[in-house]
Amino acid sequence: MAALRKLLLPKNTSVVISNSTIFLSRRGIASKLFVGGLSFYTTEKALSEAFSQHGQVIEAKIVTDRVSDRSKGFGFVTYASEDEAEKALQEMNGKPLNGRVVFVDYAKPKTDGGSTPIARGPPEPPVEQ
């Protein structure tokens, strides 16, 4: 990856790897929005079409439950530029989409959701020195 970065990409370009897509962004040019309050019947295509009225949508993703494969009621829309994302945020926040009022905000970066430790019996007594 480092060799690819040196050969093909300008110095200020970063590579962000998603589950299904590689996004190239120059100093955060690509902007991702969080969209909450979605109808369970909203599809990724419908989400992309609704938000593409405000700019070039790179990806529209609805988060689904692993077991039931049903929408969790929120998703993400990635725009080609920060300006388009800002415009979409202003225009779509609080507006109805498929019969539900949606909440739009900038997506927060993924954090390492470290696992909760598993209890394995009583705690060890403190060691005195």
Image (spheres, rainbow, N blue to C red):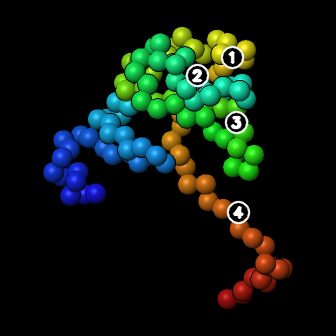
Which quadrant of the view contains residue 104?
A: top right
Q: Are marks 1 and 2 in contact (CB under 8 Å)?
A: yes
In whole angstroms, how far apart are the C-alphas of marks 1 and 2? 9 Å
Left or right, 33 with reference to 16: right
The residue lying toward the viewer, choosing from 98 and 107, is: 98
Residue drawn at point x = 46 percent, y = 32 percent? 59
Q: Position of residue 80 (x, y in %)?
A: 37, 26
The residue beneath circle 4 is: 116
Residue at mark 3: 71
Mark 3 or mark 1: whose residue is earlier in sequence = 3
| Mark 4, secondary structure of its residue | loop
Residue 46's mark?
2
Distance from disc 4 to disc 3, alpha carbons, whole Å, reads 26 Å
Give, as a three-letter code, the residue at label 2: Ala
Closer to the chain start, of discs 4 and 3, is: 3
Left or right: 74 with respect to 59? right
Distance Cα–Cα, label 3 vs label 1? 14 Å
- Amino acid on which the number 3 mark rests in the picture: Ser
Give neighbour class at mark 2: few <14, some 14-19, many 20+ (Cα, 10 Å).
some
